[in-house]
Image (spheres, helix red, strand yellow):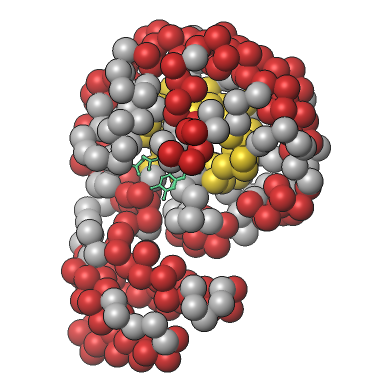
């Protein structure tokens, strides 16, 4: 039973991956995509997106991190995979799920799901350019509009040589709207000879359980749910229950250290946005994060956010005493 951390560009960047992986025992994480066009990206571009490459492709807590490529030209993808493989990532993942119009206009991401022969050629060329023991996975949606596309797309990727498929159980047209169609993961898993990993709309232990039941798949990749509840993996593995009151003191410590890190790394104009983005997800699960979110929502100055966090910390300590 594996639990993986999903790639989430602009949300689960290396520092957030580090934080989430330090709390929870993920089997591996996938970094956000590197966009491949006609040229071969220099090593520094890969290391900017996946700084873990400088640490044997592991987070500080030792969780392996795979790198992800997004593109449509089989030979450019292969050349980039070879350059990336030289940096020894824990594996390479191919992105066939991105719904962003700018990416799709340039024939990247989910739109390729309607071109199974191209998917097969991309997987084949990339596999041929990589060392044999290095894992190659692909992450796909169910199709552009019609989930029936998923079966041909998945077969093509497996036929091309990917050794594992992550299926985000929504079409491109579904965007990120619930529900995720976990029953389609079962159909994909039946159609291909490689292991399938379920993804989409797992926010709680109960979602995880139902996702596995409906999809029939053992391994699950967590996306936004992992950011909204950093202790979700711990709860799944330990069979523990969610208790916002109980977990909040630990979470508020993580928020404080995240904020210190964000202030150090980002310009003052960008730092508040990163914290608000996280609080916005945390408030789905933690009423205390909702209170904090309301306190910082309008704040643009670092000092105002420092004070809100300090106020929140002292309230937490008072309640715990
Ligand atoms: C902000 C954001 C950025 C994402 N970036 C990527 C990405 O770089 N590569 C990728 O394959 N999927 C990306 N995804 C999709 C997620 O990996 C995942 O498939 C999706 O969020 C569904 O899982 P969830 O419902 O558990 O969040 C992104 C999702 C979000 C919300």
**Is 229 situated left or right of 165 in this image?**
left
| Residue 178 found in image quarter | top left
Residue at the (29%, 64%) spot, across then down: 280
Residue at the (77%, 37%) spot, across then down: 40
| Residue 199 found in image quarter | top left
The correct choice, above or below, for 12 with respect to 83 in the image is below
Which image quarter holds the C terminus?
A: bottom left
**Is 48 situated left or right of 113 in this image?**
right
The correct choice, above or below, for 287 with respect to 99 in the image is below
Residue 11: percent from left, percent from top: 45, 56
**Is 273 situated left or right of 210 in this image?**
right
The correct choice, above or below, for 94 with respect to 16 in the image is above
Residue at the (43%, 9%) spot, across then down: 152
Which image quarter holds the N terminus?
A: top left
Q: Nearer the viewer, residue 248 or 191?
A: 191
**Is 129 situated left or right of 29 in this image?**
right
Residue 305 visible to the viewer: yes
Residue 261 visible to the viewer: no
Residue occupying the far front of the picture: 105
In which quadrant of this rendering is ligand 1 seen? top left
Q: How many marks?
A: 0
Residue 239: percent from left, percent from top: 28, 46
Q: Nearer the viewer, residue 44 or 133?
A: 44
């Amino acid at each position: 039973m594996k639990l993986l951390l999903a790639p989430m560009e602009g949300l689960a960047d290396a520092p957030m991956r580090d934080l989430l992986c330090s709390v929870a025992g993920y089997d591996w994480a996938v970094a956000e995509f590197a966009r491949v066009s006609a040229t071969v990206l220099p090593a520094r571009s890969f290391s900017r997106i996946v700084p873990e490459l400088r640490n044997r492709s592991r987070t500080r807590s030792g969780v392996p991190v795979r790198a992800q490529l997004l593109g449509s030209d089989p030979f450019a993808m292969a050349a980039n995979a070879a350059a990336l493989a030289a940096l020894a990532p824990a594996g390479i993942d191919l992105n066939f799920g991105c719904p962003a119009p700018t990416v799709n206009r340039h024939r990247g991401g989910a739109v390729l799901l309607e071109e199974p022969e191209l998917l097969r050629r991309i997987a084949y060329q990339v596999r041929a350019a990589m060392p044999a023991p290095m894992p190659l996975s692909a992450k796909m949606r169910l199709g552009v509009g019609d989930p029936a596309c998923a079966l041909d797309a998945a077969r093509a990727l497996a036929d091309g040589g990917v050794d594992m498929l992550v299926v985000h159980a929504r079409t491109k047209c579904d965007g990120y709207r619930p529900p995720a169609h976990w029953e389609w993961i079962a159909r994909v898993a039946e159609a291909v000879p490689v292991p399938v990993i379920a993804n989409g709309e797992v926010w709680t232990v109960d979602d995880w359980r139902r996702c596995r039941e409906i999809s029939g798949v053992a391994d699950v990749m967590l996306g936004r749910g992992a950011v909204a509840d950093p202790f979700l993996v711990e709860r799944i593995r330990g069979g523990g229950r969610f208790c916002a009151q109980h977990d909040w003191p630990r979470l508020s410590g993580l928020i404080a250290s995240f904020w210190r890190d964000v202030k150090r790394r980002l310009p003052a104009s960008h730092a508040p946005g990163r914290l608000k983005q996280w609080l916005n997800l945390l408030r789905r699960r933690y009423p205390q994060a909702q209170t904090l979110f309301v306190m910082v929502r309008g704040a643009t100055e670092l000092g105002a956010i420092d004070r809100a966090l300090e106020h929140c910390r002292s309230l937490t300590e008072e309640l715990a005493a």
